[in-house]
């Protein structure tokens, strides 16, 4: 009887039967570069492309460019969402990015620590009202990237949502604030429209 009880105790303490402990996430090492740890060559090429891009296409070009240039550095869901943004209907971009934020809370908290509290009450509001509430609730004025009306008039909600987290992620990874600001204004197409080429003077006809 004693031997049987001892065997049962040993079985109960068998480490193979114990529940597995969840693995601790390894801290991500931050590598700081002037490109925010993204690919320098890709961003240099993107800069040239942006200079030749019409304002209406800026968001599509910059979002895809950053998704590709920062692949493997940004959280995968974020870089994937940016890369394919130009292929999907703009009306769905806000919802798509909100779903990404749900799965990447640490990323969105870089730009808006209280994202869920700010976004949930206005999720079904008109775009302008929604963006004004996010601007105030996330205190985006402190970024000094754009003012509330510029933000509220952004045509692409997905780009507007990702602007602050992406800006702060880039600066955290070494990009100078002025450079990050310029990129984010291009992402939201909040830049002066390109001036038309100067008209060539008419040649006077010889008499």
Image (tube, grey):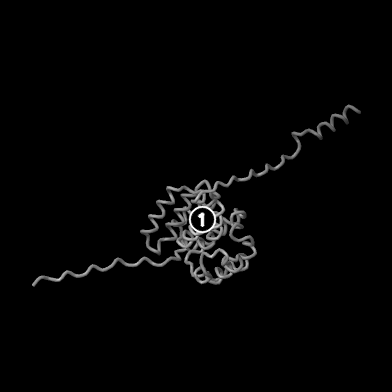
Q: Residue furthest right?
A: 1
Q: Position of residue 198 (x, y in %)?
A: 28, 67
Quarter of the figure that contains the C terminus: bottom left
Q: Position of residue 42 (x, y in %)?
A: 43, 49
Total labels: the figure holds: 1
Question: Which residue is nearer to you in this view: 131 or 196?
Answer: 196
For mark 1, give the secondary structure.
loop
Q: Position of residue 148 (x, y in %)?
A: 53, 70
Q: Is residue 105 left or right of residue 177?
A: right
Q: Residue furthest top?
A: 3
Against 173, is 130 above or below? below
Q: Residues within 10 Å of mark 1 (few under 14, many from 20)?
A: some
Quarter of the figure that contains the N terminus: top right
Question: Which residue is nearer to you in this view: 173 or 71?
Answer: 173
Q: Residue at x 53, y 51 (%)?
A: 174
Q: Residue at x 34, y 67 (%)?
A: 195
Task: Give the residue at mark 1.
Answer: 176
Q: Residue at x 32, y 67 (%)?
A: 196
Against 180, is 139 above or below? below
Q: Residue at x 81, y 34 (%)?
A: 13
Question: Which residue is nearer to you in this view: 144 or 94?
Answer: 144
Q: Position of residue 104 (x, y in %)?
A: 60, 53
Question: Which residue is nearer to you in this view: 5 or 207?
Answer: 207
Q: Is residue 58 left or right of residue 148?
A: left
């Amino acid at each position: 009887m004693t031997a049987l009880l001892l065997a049962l105790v040993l079985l109960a303490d068998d480490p193979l039967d114990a529940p597995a402990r969840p693995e601790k996430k390894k801290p991500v090492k931050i590598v700081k570069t002037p490109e925010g740890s993204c690919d320098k060559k890709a961003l240099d090429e993107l800069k040239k492309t942006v200079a030749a891009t019409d304002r209406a296409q800026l968001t599509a070009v910059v979002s895809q460019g950053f998704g590709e240039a920062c692949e493997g550095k940004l959280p995968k869901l974020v870089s994937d969402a940016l890369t394919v943004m130009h292929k999907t209907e703009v009306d769905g971009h806000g919802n798509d990015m909100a779903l990404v934020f749900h799965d990447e809370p640490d990323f969105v908290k870089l730009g808006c620590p209280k994202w869920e509290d700010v976004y949930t009450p206005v999720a079904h509001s008109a775009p302008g009202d929604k963006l004004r509430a996010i601007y105030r609730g996330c205190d985006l004025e402190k970024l000094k990237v754009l003012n509330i009306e510029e933000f509220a008039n952004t045509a692409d909600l997905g780009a507007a949502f990702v602007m602050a987290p992406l800006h702060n992620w880039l600066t955290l990874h070494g990009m100078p604030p002025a450079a990050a600001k310029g990129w984010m204004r291009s992402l939201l197409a909040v830049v002066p429209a390109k001036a038309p080429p100067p008209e060539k003077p008419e040649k006077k006809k010889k008499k």
